[in-house]
Amino acid sequence: MSYPKSKIPDPRSRIDSHPQIPIAREEAVSSPSLKQFSFVASEDDQGKRFDQFLAAAGPNLSRSQAKRWIEEERILLNGKAAKPSVHLRKGDRVAGSLPAPVPLALQPEPLPLSVLYEDASIIVIDKPAGMVVHPAPGNPSGTLVNALIHHCKDLAGINGALRPGIVHRLDKGTSGVMVVAKDDVSYHQLTKQFKSRTIDKIYLAIARGKFSREEGSIDLAIGRHPTERKRMSAHSRRGRMAVTSWKVLERWEGFTLLELHPETGRTHQIRVHLAAMGHPILGDPLYGKKGVSQDPVLRGCSRSINRQALHAHRLGFTHPRTGEMVEFVSPLPQDIGEVLEWLRSQKRQDTIRTGTRATR
């Protein structure tokens, strides 16, 4: 199984000196409170919907946001209000003024962050296990977003709000590398890469059980569990396609260290896929096997970790400002590392005991 090679940009380089990725046909004038812009429809744009054209041309709007601001008459067609569904003709002029980003009701918090890389466009974080990415009921504070709002003094706003651009998530109990956008251009560029599946994502996990092959692929649709709303399931009637490639890195009695490449990005994808194979991730509180095991090796591992043994190890993508392929690596955290050392020590002891019996 091979993955694309890439490189990490030098954090000392002046990436913020690179020009913004150009947006076709835009004539923009900025003021402290408004961003004024104007576009002229070309022959290639003839017949496009008003909102579709605006989302494609800029200024970095999603189609739903473009539709909303057209309906609010912030954006006009030939100087007049129009419906989002109207079709353009060559020479039509689209113009508007967008408000400056507004702060959200999120509190900045001086939480510790492990920053792998940062420039004017993106920040790459090594997220610890136990940290929730975004505030939600039950986790109103202490999240990665709260920490980023405090840490990043140069946020340019995402979709009209002064917040970091979360383009992907890791579960609370999953550690590892994440990329976050600081501005609209980077947010939309990275979102497109995740949707088109051009992002290189590599995870490491300790799974229970013995795999009969060295590598393989899991192709099982994933959807919401029919009765347990916090769980996802590979047996849902409304599942969406999900594919995960895996490779064995190391084996022990009852456990396997895996390298995993999720080709899609469904909620809990790796956890659900491995559980569906009969190899749940060690320590997984949602998809692991219930009850207290009598296996001394499993009990020993469980004492060393209090979450699923899943780590986002490597993330590769095209830098949204420079166009370079970049890659960031997060080393294994201490808790998973201690489990691996414990398993390796048990294997060494078994080898010594077997060797001693053989010489008698």
Image (cartoon, rainbow, N blue to C red):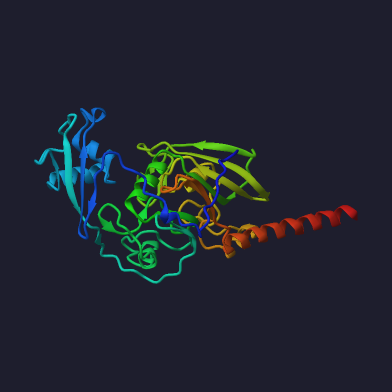
Q: Residue furthest left?
A: 80
| Percent position of residue 226, x then y | 35, 44
In the rendered view, would you say 91 is above or below 72? Answer: above
The residue under the point 23% across, 43% down is 64
Lateral position of residue 16 relative to residue 351, left or right: left
User: Which image quadrant is residue 2 in?
Assistant: top right
Residue 92 in view (yes/no): yes
Q: Quadrant of the C terminus?
A: bottom right
Label count reads: 0
Residue 95 at x, y percent in the picture:
17, 43
Q: Residue furthest right?
A: 360
Q: Is residue 38 above or below residue 330?
A: above
Q: Nearer the viewer, residue 43 or 220?
A: 43
Q: Is residue 195 left or right of residue 293?
A: left
Q: For the point 30% across and 54% down, which residue is it?
A: 158
Farthest residue in the bottom direction?
A: 110
Task: Look at the image and tell me in which quarter the N terminus lies.
Answer: top right
Across and down, in percent, residue 148 comes to: 38, 63
Relative image position of residue 350 (x, y in whole percent): 76, 56
